[in-house]
Amino acid sequence: MGSYDMKSPIKILILVFVLTLTSNIYSQQFPSGYEIFEKAKNSIAIVNVYDENRNLLRIGAGFTYTPDGQIVTAHSLVNGGTYIKIKVNDIEFAPSALYKIDRRRDLIVYKVDGNNMPFLPVGNSDNMKVGDRIFTIGNPKGFERSFSEGMISGKRDFGAGKVFFQFTGMSWPGMIGSPLLNENTEVIGLVSSRSYMNEDINFATQINSLKPILESPEVKNYSVPNFFVYEKPPTNFNIGLSYESMGEHSTAIWYYLKSLKDEVNSETYRRLAYCHEQLGNFKFAEDYYRKARDIDGNN
């Protein structure tokens, strides 16, 4: 009979121990997709955009930026809409205000009436490298809080402040506005519209290019028409406010002029003046500001 080699079982045990130790170290350094999803899911905002007749125009996502209810999403998602409905952690909200907006960087920040809301921390997008793992949670085709894993496939600078990550992963409609997450469950990008690019390629605005806006103490605090108020039809003035808040000043002017047929007041003239000022029509702006002052002076 051949002799029994005691070294073979010992080698196997050592190999098993090394593999187990390596696996444990890897799992500690690199969290699973499930762990990231569980940490982030309650901070994901499901965003539905409606027209003035409450017909659904567009679906997308966003995320809670602060515990007091600042919701970040993409401007291209809500552009042209009248009513916005936001769901966070299975609770539906109508935005109480529009806080910040930057159309060039495809960013908009709403405020909802919430306290101690779950929120996502913002990371440093400069630390991300091509090949790094990334994660998204969005609303593709209406399937809320759908999770996807991919990687950074490129870093693109298109000029004029448009600095993007190109990434692999889910690309169906409903992902615009979704946060791009790193392995620490930090937001390092905001999934952007691809309407002006190849629709098969995913892009997200790098969060560092958005930080100056997000961290600025200056807020717009524009009023937003409330989706949940059904007992009264939307007024021309409120629709004008909505289009103004989206930067659609020409359309806002049209609705403000219609509202003057319903009621003449100084606030409508001021809004008309502001919109013309934004469009560079300074003579019209001056005339409307003067009309507003005249009405206030007579009251």
Image: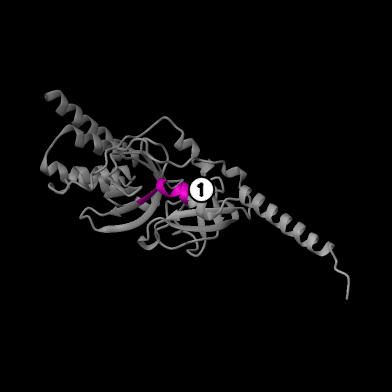
Q: Amino acid at mark 1?
A: Gly
Residue 294 percent location from the top left of the image: 16, 27
In the image, which residues are magenta? 38-46
Q: Is residue 46 left or right of residue 213?
A: left
User: On screen, 178 above or below 116?
Assistant: below
Q: How many labels, in total?
A: 1
Q: Residue at x 46, y 50 (%)?
A: 38
Residue 204 in view: no
Viewer-nearest residue: 231 or 29 = 29
Q: Is residue 41 left or right of residue 113?
A: right
Residue 158 percent location from the top left of the image: 55, 51
Residue 33 percent location from the top left of the image: 53, 55
Viewer-nearest residue: 17 or 33 = 17
The residue identified by callout 1 is 189
Q: Does the magenta segment cover residue 125?
A: no
Q: Residue at x 22, y 30 (%)?
A: 290
Residue 128 in view: yes
Q: Main secondary structure of the magenta part?
A: helix
Viewer-nearest residue: 292 or 126 = 126
Residue that sits furthest to the front in the current view: 1
Residue 140 percent location from the top left of the image: 40, 61
Residue that sits furthest to the bottom in the current view: 1
